[in-house]
Amino acid sequence: MINAVKSLVKDDSGATLVEYGLLLALVALAAIVAMSTLGSKVSSLFTNASNDL
């Protein structure tokens, strides 16, 4: 019984999936923030360009 509990504690095969999920969520969050920031700047750039024409 104690050996079974020890093997469950040492088993970390599912941890990699969780780590990949967290990493993917962090990359997606960074991409959303970057796109929203750059999107507003690009929009204002095109607005200014069209007003100058």
Image (cartoon, helix red, strand yellow):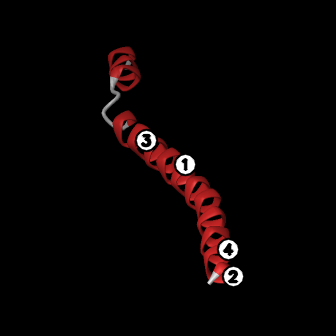
Dot 1 or dot 2: first in sequence order is: 1
Kindly identify which numbered label has been placed on residue 44: none
Disc 1, disc 2: CB below 8 Å? no
Disc 3, disc 2: CB below 8 Å? no
Q: CA distance from mark 3 to mark 2?
A: 49 Å
Disc 2, disc 4: CB below 8 Å? yes
Between 20 and 12, the residue placed more toward the observer is 20
- Choose mark 4 or mark 3, whichever is in front: 4
Residue 46: image location, x then y, percent: 60, 75
Kindly identify which numbered label has been placed on residue 48: 4
Q: Secondary structure at mark 4?
A: helix
Q: If the image is split into quadrants, where does the C terminus sit?
A: bottom right
- Choose mark 1 or mark 4, whichever is in front: 4
Q: Residues within 10 Å of mark 1 (few under 14, many from 20)?
A: few
Between 2 and 41, the residue placed more toward the observer is 41
Q: Can you identify the residue that label 3 sits on?
A: 18
Q: Quick check: 25 left or right of 38?
A: left
Q: Residues within 10 Å of mark 4 (few under 14, many from 20)?
A: few
Amino acid found under the numbered disc labelled 1: Ala
Q: Can you identify the residue that label 1 sits on?
A: 30
